[in-house]
Amino acid sequence: MSKLTQLSHESSGVKILRAIAAIGFIAAGANHFVKPGFYRQIVPPGFSAPAALVAISGVAEIAGGAGLLVRPLRRLAGFGLIALLIAVFPANIYMALAPRRAPASNFPEWALWLRLPIQALIGAWVWYVAIDRSRAGFPERPVRDSNAL
């Protein structure tokens, strides 16, 4: 089966998961501009220019989400979104450690802690729908036979 045929036969489940991820990131990124005050307050102390960081991360989420939907940009968007998830992780930790100082007081404390491993699951989701070469029509790497000389 050719690469083109393999790509066109991508499962509808993967396409749906990709669309959900794209919509989620685009919506989350847009929310940075709808409610910038919330996001500025969760930038941990010591990080400079909270307004700029919120705007940059919002644009990155929108661009990454849109990139998931464009095949030539998909892998780059996936790597970018995973990098973004890592970059914003300090804000998630700050919310969990200081729920009364951050605007997290409306959320149960257990939810703030649960959010931390969920970030890793979201990263795995992005990897699966954007980067995973084994399912994206790319040839697998050859497996070495450990018994071969």
Image (cartoon, helix red, strand yellow):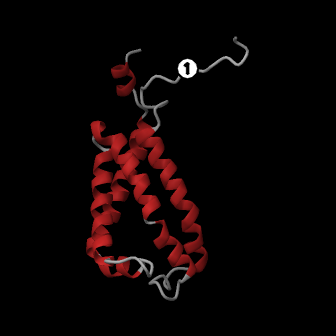
Say which residue appears at 42% left-offset and 55% top-offset: 83
Say which residue appears at 39% left-offset and 82% top-offset: 41
Residue 50 versus residue 82 in the image, above or below? below
When asked about the image quadrant of residue 30, the answer is bottom left
Residue 5 versus residue 77 in the image, above or below? above
Element carrying mark 1? loop
Q: Nearer the viewer, residue 119 or 80?
A: 80
Residue 27 versus residue 132 in the image, above or below? below
Say which residue appears at 51% left-offset and 78% top-offset: 95
Say which residue appears at 46% left-offset and 84% top-offset: 102
> From this viewpoint, which residue is outermost toward the top?
149
Q: Nearer the viewer, residue 138 or 44?
A: 44
Residue occupied by mark 1 = 142
Query: Which class describes the residues within 10 Å of circle 1: few (<14), some (14-19), or many (20+)?
Result: few
Total numbered circles: 1
Q: Position of residue 130 (x, y in %)?
A: 40, 41
When asked about the image quadrant of residue 37, the answer is bottom left
Q: Position of residue 69 (x, y in %)?
A: 30, 44
* Image quarter in which the N terminus is found: top left
Q: Is residue 26 left or right of residue 131?
A: left
Q: Amino acid at mark 1?
A: Pro
Q: Position of residue 12 (x, y in %)?
A: 41, 36
Q: Position of residue 77 (x, y in %)?
A: 34, 47
> From this viewpoint, which residue is outermost toward the right?
147
* Image quarter in which the C terminus is found: top right
When asked about the image quadrant of residue 39, the answer is bottom left
